[in-house]
Image (spheres, coloured by chain):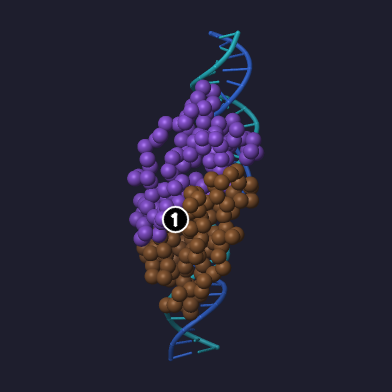
Chain colours: A brown, B purple, C cyan, D blue
Amino acid sequence: MTALPVLPSHAVVCCSPVTAGVLDDGQAEVLARMFKALGDPNRVKLLSIIAASEGREACVCDLTEPVGLSQPTVSHHMKLLVEAGLVAREQRGRWAYFSIVPGVLDSLAGTLAPR
Amino acid sequence: MTALPVLPSHAVVCCSPVTAGVLDDGQAEVLARMFKALGDPNRVKLLSIIAASEGREACVCDLTEPVGLSQPTVSHHMKLLVEAGLVAREQRGRWAYFSIVPGVLDSLAGTLAPR
DNA sequence: GAACGATATTGACGAACGTCGATACGTCGC
DNA sequence: GCGACGTATCGACGTTCGTCAATATCGTTC
């Protein structure tokens, strides 16, 4: 499978550091949305599986068994991760592939601990 | 107010990187717990207020008004942040002070993006 | 177009969550 | 000890969430 196209960087639209001053409601909302997406053990595990996969992408068909959840549940979780902007979805024939959005984890890490 | 005592480093017990391989259920659970604590805009804002305060600590009496929530709600949120290991609480007379647990944000950031 | 396989969506259920008024509890000053 | 003050806890409420079986939708193959 080929590398995913490079998406526009989210760094400029993503996140304000928690530690750079008092966040306003909008900024806090943006951050909280992403953290909430990671606030479920199954979704953390799903993200780690994708991150550990070749090309940092994985087919949803390979995600169901490792987390031991039903297909609808995994689909639902993946939808939440996509909506949170952490992963991107690409339909390839019958298969849905998910990949880590480039730079997003770096950005999110940067909100917790400025570099 | 004096600096808080240096707490034992949590780095050794805190977190496994999301991006260093597939996490087991326990590791994912630990991370998810902290992310979930940050999954509420008000708690993100509370954390940012504490982080922006002198000495990275703040009195709960200074937290209620900026988030515009009732006293019981703020108390409840602070309890969740403490239980998640992100902040520590210290009673000083009538006042409860909360501080960022040293190193915890760095550790958590490191789980998202290894340095 | 029909059959098949993959996957998203729907609906129901029980659990968890965020909020606040009321109250309980601990500290301080007299 | 009592009253005032600060803050945690309780209980109720409406909302949100994680789960799964059933079903709908979409892409592929013949």
Q: Residue at x 62, y 40 (%)?
A: B67
Q: Is B29 placed left or right of A24 in the picture?
A: left
Residue C11's spot in the image, x, y percent? 57, 61
Please give the chain letter of the residue carrying mark 1: B
Q: Eyeballing the image, is A38 above or below A74?
A: above
Per the image, label 1 sits on a secondary structure element best described as helix
Q: Residue at x 49, y 61 (%)?
A: A77
Residue A101's spot in the image, x, y percent? 50, 65
Q: Is residue A55 visible?
A: yes
Q: Residue at x 48, y 28 (%)?
A: B2
Q: Nearer the viewer, residue A48 or D13?
A: A48
Look at the image and tell me in which quarter the C terminus of chain B lies: bottom left
Q: Eyeballing the image, is B40 above or below A96?
A: above
Residue indicated by mark 1: B112
Q: Nearer the viewer, residue A34 or A22?
A: A22
Q: Amino acid at mark 1?
A: Leu
